[in-house]
Image (cartoon, helix red, strand yellow):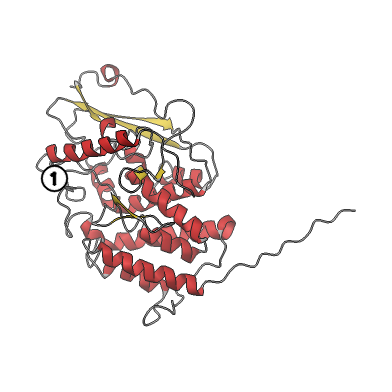
Amino acid sequence: MKPTTKMQSVAAIRFVRLLIAAAVAVFAGVALAWGFAEEPLTFRDPYTGQTTDEEISTIHADLTYVLALAAGFSTDDAALLLIWNQLTDSEALGPGAAISYTNAYTGAGPAFYPPPDPDVVCRGKIHSTAIWPRPADMVVSTSVTSRFGPYSPFFHFPRQNAQETGALHDWAWGLTDRLVGYEAYAWGSPADMTVLRAACRYTRTAVITTSVPAGSLEAFGVYLHSLADSYSHLACNAAMTGLGMPWATHTTPPLDQSVPECDYHPRTPAANDVHGREFYTYTDALRTDAAIQHIYRELVARSQQRAGRYWPIGLDMPLAAIAGAPTLSQTLYAFVHNWDFEQAAERRAYADQLAAAILAQRRAIQRLYLPLTTR
């Protein structure tokens, strides 16, 4: 994976980022982080080691690299999976004003369909103000995975069913060339600043236009991100379904009514909030364990079927280079439970130890290639 060319003006993208920061200051309750929220740690380029100014999730980034190495991927492929997993949230990554990686749509035609007419779909309801999506807050205007775009709940709050995580799975594995998801829209009055307060909410099925090839490792990285988010937001999805909501979103009391499974304030993240509890000794961290186990199964299956260069390391295999020779499963548990949300640097340091230990003991697959014979 090499740094991409700039898909649009760097200055424009950075300006949009400044607008996002300003919007957060004004709308304290508007959520900027979705599943496995950004931690107090910035992106580190897996190819160069250079750090940037974008905060990341150690689940989506650092641990993805470790799991991919353990599953048998090359270091380059593991790095690519890390980048495309994190890009699903970040849209663009790079140091300072530079852009090293982006998931901007580069195909012919528009990235998004024209939005529905609220006069038609919201008849009888207040719809003077568009509440969702929020294109002005997108980092890259053509990123279909943007947390502020019409496909946001599909990628970041996917339900664990055939239509959502199942559709992403089949696209990422190359079982279909079409990624069928759904668009989400909301309208209300000027005072209705959140989806939960919107008078009119609307969804429609859509074939998502993306320049990421179906079945590619880039697509697989996107799928792993959404798969993890499906666990991160499992309780929130269930709560929103119980409220009759067509899709899930974070709630931000007092701007919204409180939905404990969904309450989150990105300006003031805490070790005991809905995403902070995904680490350390909280019961919610058990969902993180389940997400990691599922992600590793997917990575091992992908490695064994087509992409692996090394034999996968079993979850019960000891890592000899780690003190006490814990099994891989025990180290993954430690990654989640030994440090709280705010101790992201400690998680990264431990992930680096795990990566070195895995690289030191994994075994290359010796493939036998037989020459073709002719009569």
Residue 158 seen in this snapshot: no
Residue 241 picture quarter:
top left
Would residue 32 be found to the left or right of residue 318 on screen? left
* Residue at image location 47% in from the left, 49% down from the top: 220
Residue 30: percent from left, percent from top: 18, 40
Work out whether residue 128 or residue 307 is closer to the camera in this orientation and state it.
307
Classed neighbour count for the residue bearing mark 1: other residues with Cα under 10 Å, few (<14), some (14–19), many (≥20): some
What's the amino acid at mark 1? Ser
* Residue at image location 31% in from the left, 43% down from the top: 97
Residue found at the far left of this picture? 254
Would residue 67 be found to the left or right of residue 123 on screen? right
Work out whether residue 9 or residue 35 is closer to the camera in this orientation and state it.
9
Depicted 244 relative to depicted 220: above or below: above
Residue 80: percent from left, percent from top: 46, 52
Residue 203 seen in this snapshot: yes
* Residue at image location 35% in from the left, 46% down from the top: 93
Residue found at the far bottom of this picture? 324
Residue 184: percent from left, percent from top: 31, 32
Residue 325: percent from left, percent from top: 40, 80
Would residue 83 be found to the left or right of residue 16 on screen? right
Q: Which residue is mark 1?
A: 258
Label 1 sits on a secondary structure element that is: loop
Residue found at the far right of this picture? 375
